[in-house]
Image (cartoon, rainbow, N blue to C red):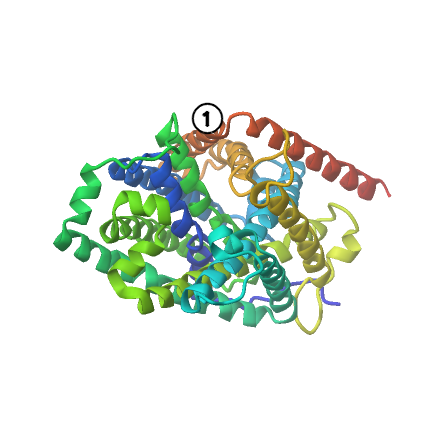
Amino acid sequence: MDNKLKRKYGLFMAICMVVGIVIGSGVFFKAQTILTKTGGNMPLGILAWAIGGAIMLVCLLTFAFMGQKYELVNGLVDYAEATVGPRFGYYMGWFATTIYYPAMTSALAWLSARYTLVFITSVNPDFPMTIPVAEGGNIIGPECMALTLFYLCAAYAINALSPKLAGKLQTSTTVIKLIPLGLMAVAGIIYGLTSGTLTRNFSTIAQTEGVSSNPLFASVTATAFAYEGWIIATSINSELKDSKRNLPRAMALGGIIIIAVYILYYIGVAGGATNQQLIDLGATVAFTNIFGGVLGNILNLFVAISCIGTMNGLMIGCCRGMYSLAVRGRGPATEVYSQVDIRTNMPNNSSVFALLITAAWFLYFYLSNLAGTWTGPFVFDSTELPIITIYFMYLPIFIQWMRKEKDQPVMRRFVLPILAICGSVFMVVACIISHKWANFWYLIVFAVIMVIGGLVDRKNRNS
């Protein structure tokens, strides 16, 4: 075994990692969520997308400049270790490996399956489903669950057996997913202006029961899931050619592309259907209204491919999680998880752990969020609440960067980190206000997992 990952990815792959991981299912189904939480208030929804994007961009740029100075194995862990210390770096990596990466990956596998079935049942309404589509068969039916597990295993297999193929899948799905977004943005705005739908949506409030008591905070929290995942692109920095130059460039360019695409898509969707239709039926109705049934269904296929691409990017980060800790001599069974296959140049043992922990989070997501089988206090949104902890854990990194890096210019050392701190605090506060007591129960689960991480690390270091 050769315990070193080779540099096999270029700048375009890095940009596709940033754009491809972030732009996925979130922009499609969170658009409906934001409309619901704002009561169909389009200007407030656009403001929420802009605030969420600005927070992502300042955090992204701050980490991009860190990427020019720190480089080891996994960007996020590298930055935490170099600024705050090895122990904090370990806990950041443990959190990302056991909670953040797998929780999001499991949700994306389900969304990939859901939108695949939406496409299939749209093309063939008579497609046999154990639970009819009208009763949620595309959401909680056994076909959706089986397809979800297939996508999880397929993403693991592609990444574990052929990382180059996984990279090609990432770049191709990123290009493909921009097609429906670009078409919807351009055609929706033109259609909305000529039909008057866009003007009416900006001046009319829809009737809905899901309006939040704090619509702006709730909407920004919803955008957090759609904007989240960019930090995972740093997980390939040790496999990126000229990473100190290419990673910051990819993060900056990728962030700008993401914000522009999201806001233009949101406006385009508003031009394709009324706010009430979008709240009740989702963005699919806008595709169908503008492009017709046939092309609208084809675009549903692009949405499914978009979700698959995002899931693949998340799995890329998942597979390297335990490896990034083990090569530092931290965590459990370091000699096992630090191994890299000589033929595939992949940490296969780390990848196996990634599949196992992702499957566990999917089980939780299904029982508590989809099927509603679990009730009681320990039921929370596993796609949004881990965000409260990752933004909170960014804070000491930003603070220590300002304290230590005296050779950096003012913009890099103070202005961007201060803006990133303000944005991170805003995200934490928005999450607390939006999810209320669910934060408390999630934080208990978070604390237990972190304590387990500390115990296995201590046992390893004492043995």
Front-most of residues 221 and 406: 221
Q: Is residue 25 above or below residue 443?
A: below
- Residue ranking furthest to the right: 463
Amino acid type of the residue tagged 1 in the rendering = Ile
Secondary element type, mark 1 = helix
Q: Is residue 138 visible?
A: yes
Q: Which residue is mark 1?
A: 433
Front-most of residues 288 and 345: 288
The percent coordinates of residue 366 (x first, y second) are 61, 47
Q: Is residue 111 visible?
A: no
Horizontal arrangement in the rendering, residue 397 relative to residue 19 (left or right): right
Horizontal arrangement in the rendering, residue 449 relative to residue 221 (left or right): right
Please report the residue visible at 78 percent of the width from the left and 41 percent of the height from the top: 456
The percent coordinates of residue 117 (x first, y second) are 49, 62
- Residue ranking furthest to the bottom: 343
User: In the figure, residue 204 lies in which quadrant?
Assistant: top left
The percent coordinates of residue 384 (x first, y second) are 51, 40
Q: Please rate how many residues cluster around mark 1, counting C-alpha atoms within 10 Å: few if below 14, some from 14 to 19, many from 20.
A: some
Q: Is residue 198 above or below residue 129?
A: above
Give the quarter of the figure containing the N terminus: bottom right
Question: How many marks do you count on the picture?
Answer: 1
Please report the residue visible at 61 percent of the width from the left and 35 percent of the height from the top: 379
The percent coordinates of residue 164 (x first, y second) are 56, 71
Horizontal arrangement in the rendering, residue 457 relative to residue 273 (left or right): right
Give the quarter of the figure containing the C terminus: top right
Q: Is residue 455 above or below residue 280?
A: above
Q: Is residue 449 above or below residue 74?
A: above
